[in-house]
Image (tube, rainbow, N blue to C red):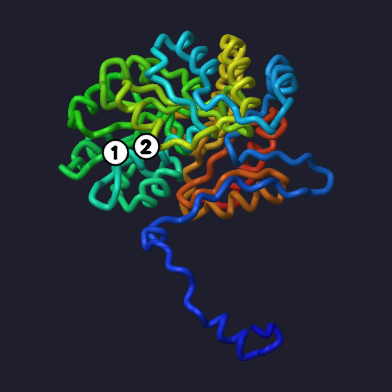
Amino acid sequence: MNDSDPAATDSASSAAAPRLRSALDTFPPYIPGKPPRKVEGLESFKLSSNENFLPPLPAVLDAMVAHATNPALYPDDAALALRQGLADRLGVGLDQLVVTTGASELLVALTQITSDVTTEAIYPWPSFEMYPQTTGLVGSTRHEVPLTPEGRHDLDAMAAAITDRTSLIILCSPNNPTGPVLRDDEVRAFLDKVPSHVLVALDEAYWEFATAPGRADGLSLVRDYPNLVLVRTFSKAHGLAGLRVGYAVAHPPVIEGLLKAVIPFGVTDLSQAAALESLSHWDEVLDRAARIAQSRDAFAAALREQGCDVPEAQANYVWLPLGGKSSAFEDACVEQAVAVRNLGAGVRISIGEDEALARVLEIAERFRVEHFAE
């Protein structure tokens, strides 16, 4: 082809695009949290991605340096040392654990081993944005069950949505982005209604921050329900989001299925070492999570005192259900060098430094005066 020939160029540009699956048109792409805008005279804060704002534990950084040696070699595909550490800490068998590149890979693998165009998936909405993406990619029919006005799972409605085509149900506790945590008794009552052949995933990415009495205990639930798989991550409380380490706890048949679907050698040697070191400082990790939870509670209380409608907050973020005013609130934060997460129905604000939260409180106070004054 002559690159300078206009006719050839027109012909190439008019050629049909590669044919992609029609399922891609049924859900939006995942959009990560935006970085903050730089504003002269103001320190910028990113409160849009639920990252742990505390620095990694020093021992974890040391472990990363010690294992950043030879990237030419593949990591241990079985992640045996990390799985053994998890098994000892959680009181489960090695055959009940799989380690993956973040909890996100687990969500993809779970849909791959349960779902296709003949099946149906059920999950709460709004919730984690990857649920429609992963279930949509396999062509499964999706039932997005609306949350209650309090931002909680409507478990009765989710149970009523089960059909003979249901293959996967996803629960999120604490729910991202609204914040409430599931209670143990309500989850057990729900699981008793789920047919034993339907796999239920309990996404506990933020479980370390939850403090509500009676909150669901994923580990005890997995022991009692063979069709339940517990999804957790080192990204949040452990502060290792950039290293991509997630894990699942389930009965052996489910783990065997997941091992056929996850990416080989996905979790690097450096990531495994950092996660294992962090695991050995379990009490410190939980202490840091408790400190963040205290900041969250104080922040949520201050917003409520202003008159904001803040649902139960049990993770490292709070939710403002602002509806049509969400974009205006995001813009107000952007102008003050703060990035928050606008999800259309509301705005999610991650817990960050004291100065960042104080600035958001000032923005919220002005916003209420300007947008909600009678």
Q: Residues within 10 Å of mark 1 (few under 14, many from 20)?
A: many
* Residue in the picture at 69% in, 22% down: 56
Q: Quadrant of residue 61?
A: top right
Q: Which amino acid does label 1 sit on?
A: Leu
The answer to whether residue 372 is visible is no
- Marks 2 and 1: in contact by CB < 8 Å? yes
* Residue in the picture at 72% in, 31% down: 355
The answer to whether residue 237 is visible is yes
**Quadrant where the N terminus is found in the figure:** bottom right
User: Percent x, y for residue 261?
Assistant: 40, 37
Seen as rendered, the residue at the extreme right is 41
Against 108, is 250 above or below?
above
* Residue in the picture at 61% in, 30% down: 74
Against 52, is 7 above or below?
below
Q: How crowded is mark 2: few (under 14 residues within 10 Å), some or many (20 or more)?
A: many
Seen as rendered, the residue at the extreme left is 164
Q: Which mark is residue 153?
A: none
Q: What residue type is labelled 2?
A: Leu
User: Percent x, y for residue 8?
Assistant: 61, 87
Disc nearer the start of the sequence (1/2): 2
Q: Which mark is residue 110?
A: 2
Say whether residue 353 is left or right of residue 282.
right
Disc 1 is placed on an element classified as strand
User: Percent x, y for residue 201?
Assistant: 34, 31
Distance of label 1 from label 2 (alpha carbons): 8 Å
Say whether residue 265 is left or right of residue 158.
right
Q: Mark 1 points at which residue?
A: 168
Disc count in the image?
2
User: Percent x, y for residue 205?
Assistant: 48, 29
Against 339, is 170 above or below?
above
Q: In which quarter of the image is residue 244?
A: top right
